[in-house]
Image (spheres, helix red, strand yellow):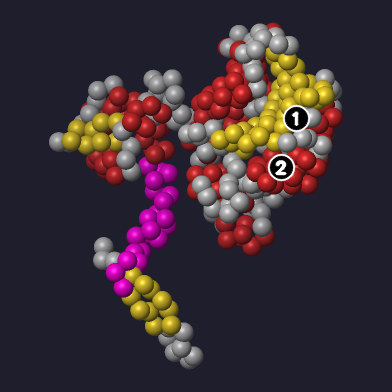
Amino acid sequence: MSQISDVRPVERTGATPQVHAGPTANPSRIFQTINAFQQTGALRAAIELDVFTAIAEGLRTAPEIAGRAHAAERGIRILCDYLVMLGLLTKHEGRYGLAEDAAVFLDRRSPAYMGTIARFLNAPEIMDAYRDLTQAVRQGGTTMSGKGSVDPEDPIWVEFAHSMAPLMYMPARRIAELVGGGAGERMKVLDIAAGHGLFGIAIARQNPQAQIVALDWRPVLEVALANARKEGVEARYSTLPGSAFEVDFGNGYDLVLLTNFLHHFNPITCEGLLRKVHAALVPGGRVVLLEFVPNDDRVSPPETAFFSIIMLGTTPDGDAYTFAEYQEMLSNAGFGNAEHIHLEPMPESVIIASK
């Protein structure tokens, strides 16, 4: 595609604007972005057809993969070629291979397999939130019915608990290490919006003295309990069904986990919940946040800052808050100095503050 540079519209009263073009401006980014939904469709199709696992098992040609997937050879060839262009597959002399990311995360046999995340991230309810993003921008919040993804007992969070767990194994282990989960000291932990339960479970696995209380909607807690049972910590894992804003937490907690939760709400709502958390902690107790935390410019790093538009599309007033904003919320709720820890290579950060 030819390149056009230095494009500067020149306004002329009563005349059509003129454009001065040079050699560096390029419409490719616009074309690629407007067609980005095709990447989503291709990856989801490959996951549903188990293309990556088929290739990992040694089926390398379009006819071989098509036979295993019960799909048309033409369809598989075009899909796999597109995945090569996306950098998820390789191709040499008509034979396909897995790029490193696909081998680690998209082969169903891999312990790090995360193909299930498409079931939540591409759920119809989530996708529909972006069909009229223009209106969401106009009104400053989601066009989804009710309160969007924060509607009480929204069944989508059951799907979240089932499908998003693979993405959280690494952050859960890191948080357990950061809070001294392996120290063996008695620890009472409240896991708010527990979902799949992996964060509390990781602490319970590392520390045989840890008692976990998981809070979420009752159907979601069934998923967390099943995971606790599978990991052998069910005896030290109890549940507290209901809304984090309405349920009585009790007190005496050494640690409260607030993972992937505060970004759904405005700062005033977040502060109110943090005050409630503060009251439930013992002196010296800690709150742990896991969040997408962009720099103060709100556009970097892009793999973190992008999260704001997800909140615009799916919540009435959620956002990706900066560390300075979280510091202010925590301080207003009574917490001391907050520590900000980047979880490389994940896009999220951990924030820990003490009572």
Quarter of the image with the C terminus in it: top right
Q: Residue at x 46, y 29 (%)?
A: 114
Q: Bin the neighbour count of mark 2 within 10 Å (Cα to Cα): few under 14, some 14-19, many 20 and up.
A: some
> Which of marks 1 and 2 precedes in the sequence?
2
Looking at the image, which is closer to me, 126 or 173? Answer: 173
Looking at the image, which is closer to me, 269 or 252? Answer: 252
Which residue is labeled 2 in the image? 327
Give the left or right position of residue 277, taking residue 193 as reference: right
Looking at the image, which is closer to me, 69 or 220? Answer: 220
Residue 91 lies, in percent from the top left, at 22, 37
Q: Residue at x 41, y 28 (%)?
A: 105
Location of residue 4 by image quarter: bottom left
Outermost residue, bottom side: 14
Location of residue 44 by image quarter: top left
Tell me how far mark 2 sits from mark 1, CA to CA.
12 Å
Above or below, 274 relative to 19? above
Location of residue 338 by image quarter: top right
Q: Bin the neighbour count of mark 1 within 10 Å (Cα to Cα): few under 14, some 14-19, many 20 and up.
A: many
Give the left or right position of residue 208, taking residue 41 as reference: right
SS majority, magenta: helix
Q: Amino acid at mark 1?
A: Ser
Residue segment shown in magenta: 22-42
Which residue is labeled 1 in the image? 354
Q: Amino acid at mark 2?
A: Gln
Q: Helix or strand or loop: what does disc 1 sit on?
A: strand
Residue 66 lies, in percent from the top left, at 27, 31
Quarter of the image with the N terminus in it: bottom left
